[in-house]
Image: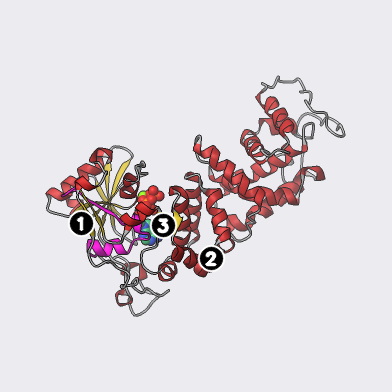
Amino acid sequence: MPLKPSSESSRPAEPVILPRAAHGLSRSRIDPNTLQVLYRLRRAGHLAYLVGGGVRDLLLGRTPKDFDVGTDATPQQVKKLFRNCFLVGRRFRLAHVRFGADEVVEVATFRRQATADDLPEDPSDHRLLAENVFGTPREDAFRRDFTINALFYDIATFSIIDHVGGLADLEARRLRVIGDPLVRFTEDPVRMLRALEFAARLDFTLDEATREGIYTRAPLIAEAAPARIREELLELFRHAVAGKVLRQAQATGLLEPLLAGFEGDDATFALLDRIDARTRGGAPPGEGLVLAALFLSRFLRQCPPTADLPIGQVLELANLELDLHCGYFRISHGTRHQARELLVGCYRLGRGRGHRGERRFLQHPATPLALELFDLWHQTPDGHRQLVETWRSTLHQPAKPGVPQAPAEAPAAPQKRRRRGRRRRPRGAARPDA
Ligand code: ATP
Ligand code: MG
């Protein structure tokens, strides 16, 4: 991939500097450990800036997820200043300053975008090393992704330093790539997904050139490292913007190369919206639930609950739905298993009560979550509300040992009760009600 510097012509000649009196970013909103790191770097004679999303969020009056520090001190110099400091990262050497058991302040030395000259002659050789080139604060601003993510807060003067026009974009609530979107998306296609994510999270509009850049470069996302895509996808769910962003991805041609085999139909997008609403009211979904939600619509089309298929075949179809995605993204066996349980659980719930294996199904640890997913899926006017309620009351009824529970809804064709006790099944065959 070419590593050209971003378009020089569009760069403002001088940074905009907002003195303390001209902005609303107050130190009291910065985490005290981060402040301590900034002050100590400053006292040792280094530049010390709050950088990235922390500045953006504080200027917008939002609570930042975390705070990052930028400095002209090298990682080694940072390490000398802090007792609890560890150098991490192969691609970029970063300093992690630890506080207590679980707080880390990340300190990065200003760096610049690698250019062709920084690369070794043999391109297969150490591209990673070439990316770790230190630079000036201005160069550091320009190697960042979006203008609103490249603002600096200087602890020496309490002013905001803007090299890239980020303040104007914050004001206009606009998400804009730094430099030429075509170049920046070629350098790193994951930025396309991040662009949609930030626009959705902040409710900003996408700058026109940024949007067109996504249209043009969308196919490149298929070449991005699966681990990064997987992480950004989970990020969409954590921030409750999965429905919004994946719709936008479809509209800009990004969805197909992003998630091969995933079909963005209206029912799925509506389900993702409801999962996002659930996240806003509580905790984000785990990855098993995310996977099941992404593939539920397709899965239920393959095996509608009315088809009355043997559970072994339903399990097989659930596996088939998940195989491609889980293989590509190297999703752990446990997570894939949970997603499969949720899909099959939705099938069982959709069939109604009174089927074989119901007792074990009701006691299965995945069933409450399957019911939650089933409920979210059916929150439409024609949804099976009655069925959801029936299952819910059954699930919340404490089971009396030894007493068969009467189904609240009569099954279409009553089945013979299975013999109690274990029946042998052939080695290797799927458990009928796993
Ligand atoms: P949040 O943490 O709230 O999701 P953030 O802006 O802090 O948002 P991070 O992913 O934590 O995002 O990255 C920190 C900063 O690093 C960004 O603000 C941006 O300046 C820079 N950055 C991150 N990813 C890229 C990228 N792919 N290309 C260029 N710069 C990036
Ligand atoms: Mg961050």
Numbered circle sitting on residue 76: 1
Q: Mark 3 vs mark 2: which is more N-terminal?
A: 3
* Residue 189 at least partly seen: no
Numbered circle sitting on residue 215: none
How far apart are the two marked residues, 1 and 2, measured between alpha carbons? 37 Å
In the visual, does 375 lie left or right of 179? Answer: right
* Three-letter code for the amino acid on which mark 2 is drawn: Ala
**Mark 2, residues whose alpha carbon is within 10 Å: few (<14), some, or many (≥20)?**
some
* Residue 38 locus on image (x, y percent): 20, 47
* Three-letter code for the amino acid on which mark 3 is drawn: Leu
From which residue to which does the magenta span run?
A: 135-158
Asked whether the beta carbons under mark 3 and mark 1 sit within 8 Å of each other, the answer is: no
* 197 is higher (above) or lower (below) than 286: below
Residue located at (51% from left, 39% from top) = 279
Secondary structure under badge 3?
strand
Q: Mark 1 vs mark 2: which is more N-terminal?
A: 1
How far apart are the two marked residues, 3 and 1, measured between alpha carbons? 35 Å
Q: Mark 3 vs mark 1: which is more N-terminal?
A: 1
Numbered circle sitting on residue 222: 2
Q: Residue 420 is drawn in which quadrant?
A: top right
* Residue 286 locus on image (x, y percent): 53, 42
The question of residue 140 being in magenta is answered with yes
How far apart are the two marked residues, 3 and 2, measured between alpha carbons? 23 Å
